[in-house]
Amino acid sequence: MGLVIDVGGRGDHSFNDAALRGLELWAAGKRYEGGKYVDATPDEVRQSLPPHLSADAASFKALAIQPIVLQSKAQEDYVPNLQLLVDQGARLTVGNGYMLANAVRTSAQENPKAQFLLIDSQVLDAQGKAMKLPNVRTVLFKEQEGSFLVGALAGLVTKTNKVGFVGGIEVPLIQRFEVGYRAGVKTTNAQASQALMSVYTGSFNNMAAGKQVAQDLISKGADVLFHAAGADGIGVIQAVKEARAAGKSVYAIGVDSDQSHVAPDAILTSMMKYSDLAVYQAAKDLVDGTFSAGEQVLGLKENGVGMAEVRVDFPGKAEALQKVEALRQRIISGTLQVPAVPADLASFQAAAP
């Protein structure tokens, strides 16, 4: 089973690492170390599972999967990398990220007998319109729902009533993070909502850019920063870590994976996107002979997104988490609809928890 990761690369502690975890650690039972695979222990697998899956740790047994992972250095690498995996006999080839959408379409059309999994995007035609192919499964996420939860928490935690958002490339996918975050802040802290500052770095692989914009936001008074910026986000976390070392009470909110291990004291929480589970499930379907094409859209109700455990302490933590949980239940039940596009944000109103 092959996986092509985008230019953010291995070690982003975020989106790419989530897909790698789903394929290498969960599906294959392997750990990538020193340029080669070694067997992972059951404890390593168990500790990597999110809380809602930890009770099912015994079911995450290594499958008859051999992982082949190719790193893309530039967008021009996507199609050749996908083709190389097909040529090497991969029964299922994963394109990880919306940036691979066109490449997956090209490869799937040129290799109709091969099967593909596209994470984070629909298959798009040459005009950018959604299309379906009989050999491609697509998995999309309701990023706005998980982002709403961390935004609600940010609104409850901020002391300056100023919070920030750092995005990577400004595309509809990343805007869903921002819109959900803004809606969450608006629900718990109207003043912070009006002062919310948003910046896009224009990339996903420039830590220095992420650090610079984060330092600027902190200098303007933002004390909670949520990033959806790939490797740029590591720079955001670094800026927050350094600000805390200088005596400022600021937090970062991670994305896609639980990033608390990057800077334990600086990470308030993370907006979880369980693409690792989507990759693992596809691998399991492949082994079971049940893999099929089609589209999956995963939100809070489907355990596709969520909020990581809050490991730091702050005044009023228990009450704040109760309020966020009440909002989570309203989203799951359908009584609270989180906006996904900027045009719907102005009219959004939700009763405070």
Image (cartoon, helix red, strand yellow):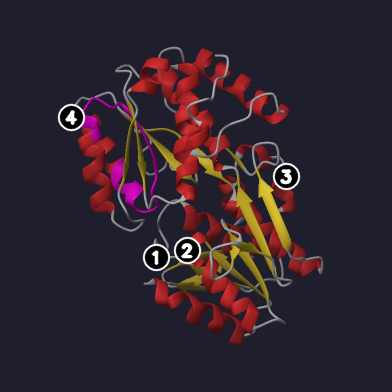
Q: Between disc 2 and disc 4, whose residue precedes?
A: 2
Q: Which of marks 2 and 4 is in front?
A: 2
Residue 7: mark in rendering: 1
Q: How far apart are marks 3 and 1 (CA)?
A: 33 Å
222 drawn magenta: yes
Identify the secondary structure beneath mark 3.
loop
Given residues 206 and 192, the one toward you in this image is 192
Residue 99: mark in rendering: 2
Q: Between disc 4 and disc 1, whose residue precedes?
A: 1
Q: Is residue 202 above or below residue 251?
A: below
Which amino acid, by three-letter code, is at mark 2? Met
324 drawn magenta: no
Given residues 152 and 108, the one toward you in this image is 108
Identify the secondary structure beneath mark 2.
helix
Q: Distance between the residues labelled 1 and 2?
A: 9 Å
Q: How far apart are marks 4 and 1 (CA)?
A: 33 Å
Bin the neighbour count of mark 2 within 10 Å (Cα to Cα): few under 14, some 14-19, many 20 and up: some
- Quarter of the image with the C terminus in it: top right
